[in-house]
Image (tube, helix red, strand yellow):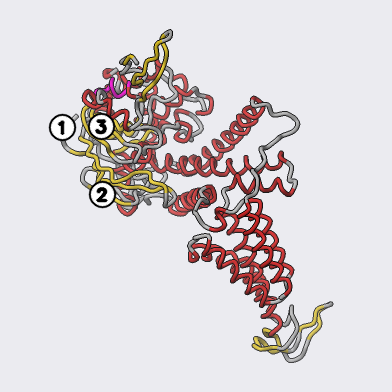
Amino acid sequence: MDVKEGTDILQVRHVSYRYHGGIQGLSDVSLDIREGEIFAVIGSNGSGKSTLLHVMNGLTPPTSGTVLFRGKEVSESTLSDPHFNRAFRAGVGYIFQDSDVQLFCPTVLDELMFGPLQLGLGEQEAQRRATEILRMLEIGDLATRPSYMLSAGEKKRAAIGSVLTMNPQVLLLDEPTSGLDPRTQVYLVELIFALNEAGKTIVIATHDLSLVSELRCRVAVLSEEHTIEKTGEADELLYDEKLLLKVNLIHEHLHYHGSTAHRHIHSHYLFHQHDRR
Amino acid sequence: MNDSLPAFLHTLHEPLPDIGHARAAPPVLDRALERIGSVIGTTFMQWELASKNGLLQTMDARVKLVCLLFLLVVGTVKNAIVPGLTLAGLLFLLVCLSRLNPVHFYRRTGVLAFLFGFLIVLPAACNLVTGGEIILPLMRLRTARTLWVYTLPATIGITREGLSVVGLVTLRMVNCLTISFLLLCTTPFPHIIKSLKLFRVPDGLLIVFVLTYKYILIFSEMLKAIHLAGKSRLSGGSAAGGAGAWAAGRITFLFRKTQSRCEEIFQAMVSRGLGKEIKLAAAGKLRRRDVAEGLCLICCGVILIWM
């Protein structure tokens, strides 16, 4: 493990993106992801979190702006260079929100072997990696099962495994906890910590504030105007009520206790401060 | 958890094996998928977002449908170039008044009209199909020949009457396509569907149209997501039959997803009270402005018939 703490591994410079040539998806977004850190992009639905991850993974070319991986530009033209493309795909793994779109091989084992085989690793090495990852993710008994016969949690594990066998330096996770039961969510958080301790850079897009609170990482807040509202530490940003209200991650909520009405800020986990009216 | 991580995951900068001069991606499949997804998505979104503040966008969908259909019939039945050109001029005016970009608009209709209007009818310009005065001889035979019921004239060439036929059919095609695109580009899809109730199209059939339309949107989004998921893990030329496995896996997945989506939609419809008879909400009342605008367009059509 030779992590250079503080070096920027992924840089997003003034990136803007428009869907179908019209609808704004991202507006002048700039970020620096340091090697070996956990970084979260938070924002309400439709703020552009997934689009930002797509752009960072070189899947969607931005309308303007640039993305750099280890100082090299990630664009359609640089990705058409086979050497850079392979280094980039091996270096940056993306775990999609919808595991279904990511699982396409006949069985879970094939799924896990697919990535290493694309990188040019031998069949035996790919098999060894897949077996180890299956064991680590506690899905060894699912190795021969087709992906459509898995539960949501199992699909998520298989999707994560399919990327981990490529041993990427950066992991982009899009809404990793959505639709998962609490036990799988806890497992996932532990896995993220373990991977980070192993030197992996983790970038998470989520609107799950409890996840961000648990990870205690650096956070970028995306506004509903699709721009970066603020970047800072989780401890600082998660207690900034005004900011979270502005970007629609928490809301004011009126309810009654007997005949007394209360209005308070509501986030389902951090705030529940009553203000008697 | 950290102890259970496989040893290879602790290696950060492992060298990649040399696999020679592999291509970055299968360009044809890659581009085709990307283009299909983008074209379907953009076209359908454009129809969905037909909300500019132009003449036809603000007109009631029922009035628009009736008027444009009337113009379509007029354009089809009139057998002369001049009324066809006048109709094309009127349609151009409507395109401009609807604040559509004429260059983009006519580029799209032009390509289709060239392929399905001009190219298909082009042989009719020849005296083998349309007799008449030859204005451009193409080939000369020693004598005229008869093959079964067909006669090959001694001089084969393009006739004045043939050119007139080609021009007329192409013009009709341009006008028909312009009218269709005008309707689609200025009317959100749900409004078109509701306006079809005017022609007593059964609600059940309308629901089928709506579901088909929504399915195409969902399908294109899914296709795009699948393509991106594959792209994010294809690091070079597909080794070990990777491309084949990918394509086969995706076809199976799409088939299964489609099947399950159909079942889910049907269950959702049943849970919301789907019975033997489907009833859709009717469109609102017509405004005076809609009627006036509609009458103007109908009058234009009547004038074209007299021309």
Disc 3 versus disc 2: distance between alpha carbons?
Answer: 18 Å
**Which residue matches tag 1?**
A5
Contact, mark 1 vs mark 2 (Cβ under 8 Å): no
Total numbered labels:
3
Q: Position of residue B3 (x, y in %)?
A: 27, 18
Q: Which mark is residue B57?
A: none
> Residue A97: x percent and y percent?
42, 32
Left-right relation of A186 to A231: right
> In the picture shown, does residue A72 fall above or below A239?
below
Nearest to N terminus: mark 3 or mark 1: 1
- Is B73 located above or below residue A85 in the figure? below
Residue B253: image quadrant is top right
* Residue highlighted by disc 2: A73
Which residue is drawn at the image coordinates 50% and 24% (left, top)?
Answer: A150
Q: Amino acid at mark 3?
A: Thr
Residue A173, by quadrant, is top left
| Residue lying at 64% horizontally and 70% vertically, measured from the top left | B87
State the CA–CA distance, disc 1 to disc 2: 21 Å
